[in-house]
């Protein structure tokens, strides 16, 4: 999940890659929670939720990380690219939480995932 000033972008990723995606705000959803519930469908088998970007915007939209954990019954973790470097590279704190940095890391991972 990526949170930025333009809104929420979320993807449901399974064994075969991206299975579903949503954007919020969107006319078909009255809330971010409704959009996320629609993302997983009728059989919500969510094992982890990763959030990148400006998480405070999500909180202001009325969706907290504890609420997501309770709703989907799984851990909610901040997505930070820096841990993937195993400490080999220092990343500026402002960049580690930047939506653009999260998107860049996601695009890079697409090239290494089968």
Image (spheres, rainbow, N blue to C red):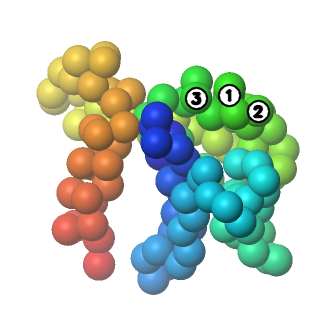
- Residue at the location (20% across, 68% down)? 111
The single residue placed furthest to the top in the displayed view is: 93
Quarter of the image where the C terminus is located:
bottom left
The numbered dot on residue 71 is none
User: Residues under labels 1 and 3: Cα distance?
Assistant: 5 Å
User: Residues under labels 1 and 2: Cα distance?
Assistant: 5 Å
Q: Position of residue 53 (x, y in %)?
A: 44, 35
The answer, for residue 65, to whether it is visible in the render is: yes
The answer to whether 37 is drawn above or below residue 43 in the figure is above
Judge the density around disc 2: few (<14), some (14-19), many (≥20) Cα neighbours within 10 Å. Answer: few
Determine which residue is flagged by label 2: 62
- Residue at the location (73% across, 59% down)? 29
The answer to whether 62 is drawn above or below residue 10 in the figure is above
Quadrant location of residue 61?
Answer: top right
Q: Position of residue 40 (x, y in %)?
A: 70, 69
- Residue at the location (60% across, 53% down)? 24
Q: Earlier in the sequence, mark 3 or mark 2?
A: 3
Determine which residue is flagged by label 1: 59
Left or right of 62, for residue 51: left
Left or right of 67, for residue 94: left
The single residue placed furthest to the left in the displayed view is: 89
Q: Nearer the viewer, residue 77 or 39?
A: 39
Whether label 1 touches label 2, CB < 8 Å: yes
The answer to whether 64 is drawn above or below residue 25 in the figure is above
Quadrant location of residue 26?
Answer: bottom right
The answer to whether 100 is drawn above or below residue 111 in the figure is above
Q: Find numbered disc 3 in the image and state the secondary structure of the residue it sits on.
A: helix
Whether label 1 touches label 3, CB < 8 Å: yes
Q: Nearer the viewer, residue 61 or 41?
A: 61
Determine which residue is flagged by label 3: 57
Q: Find numbered disc 1 in the image and state the secondary structure of the residue it sits on.
A: helix
Judge the density around disc 3: few (<14), some (14-19), many (≥20) Cα neighbours within 10 Å. Answer: some
């Amino acid at each position: 999940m990526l949170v930025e000033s333009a809104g929420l972008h979320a993807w449901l990723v399974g064994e075969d890659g991206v299975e579903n995606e949503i954007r919020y705000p969107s006319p078909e959803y009255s809330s971010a929670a409704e959009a996320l519930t629609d993302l997983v469908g009728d059989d919500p088998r969510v094992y982890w939720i990763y959030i990148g970007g400006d998480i405070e915007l999500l909180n202001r939209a009325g969706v907290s990380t504890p609420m997501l954990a309770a709703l989907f019954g799984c851990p909610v973790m901040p997505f930070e690219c820096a841990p993937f470097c195993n400490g080999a590279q220092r990343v500026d704190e402002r960049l580690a939480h930047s939506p653009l940095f999260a998107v860049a890391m996601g695009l890079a991972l697409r090239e290494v995932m089968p």
